[in-house]
Structure formats: structure tokens, C-alpha cells
Image (cartoon, rainbow, N blue to C red):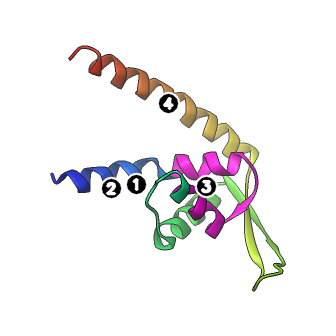
Amino acid sequence: MEKDNIKVQMRKGIMEYCVLAILANGDSYAPAIITELKRAEMIVVEGTLYPLLTRLKNAGYLTYRWEESLQGPPRKYYTLTAEGRTYLASLDEAWDTLVEQIDNIRNKR
């Protein structure tokens, strides 16, 4: 498998976790989420983010509201639900375990 393709697949696998983690810091709208992901040097495009937000909303992890904007059309702000916070906590735990397991493997090289 090509090195760049592996990196893309790894990023896709953790994008849900990253979006939930961003929303745990406060409500946000899609362009701001994309900016935050890019700031963290995660490569993401709107075509990837919008379907992910819809899946998370349909799963009950997010809700949204419309807010008027001083610059253009109204914005759809996403909010983490209580169920979303519980799910994020389980992802935090899974991530910590995974990092520990990988560190254990790497340290034996």
C-alpha cells in the first residue's frame, strides 16, 4: 500500500473523533471546524466533513441550530449532546489504550 494512501486512511479513521473533540470545546459551524482541523494539520474538505456531521447527528451525538450571521447567510451551529459526550469519553479511553499499546510495541523494537 502506498505511504500517502495509508496516511489518508488513518486520518479518515480518526476524523470522527477529532470533530467530536473540537465540539467538546464549544458549539461550532462547519467552516470553523474545517479551520480548526487544518490548524492541527489535518487534511479535510467540506465533502468529507458534511456527511460526517450528518452521520453524527443521526446517531444522536450532535444537534444543531441555525444562527443569523453578520457576514452572509445563517450558520448551522453543531452542539455535542449528552450522548455525544458519553461517546467521546469512550473514544478518549479507546484512544489512550491504543496509544499505550502502540508505545509498548514501539518500545520493544
From what the image shows, is residue 50 above or below residue 18? below
Answer with mark 1 or mark 4, whichever residue precedes in sequence.
1
* Secondary structure category for the residue under label 4: helix
Residue drawn 73% across the image and 72% down it: 76
Answer with mark 4 or mark 2, whichever residue precedes in sequence.
2
Residue wearing tag 2: 8
Residue 6 in the image, given as x and y percentages of width and height: 26, 50
Label 3 crowd (10 A; few <14 / some 14-19 / many >=20): few
Residue drawn 52% across the image and 68% down it: 51
Q: Which mark is residue 94?
A: 4
Residue 49 in the image, given as x and y percentages of width and height: 52, 65
Marks 1 and 3, how far apart in space?
Answer: 18 Å
Answer with mark 3 or mark 4, whichever residue precedes in sequence.
3
Q: Amino acid at mark 4?
A: Ala
Q: Amino acid at mark 3?
A: Ala
Q: Are marks 3 and 2 in contact (CB under 8 Å)?
A: no
Answer with mark 1 or mark 3, whichever residue precedes in sequence.
1
Marks 3 and 4, how far apart in space?
Answer: 19 Å
Q: For the magenta stretch, what is the residue range?
A: 16-37
Main secondary structure along the magenta-highlighted residues: helix
Q: Which mark is residue 45?
A: none
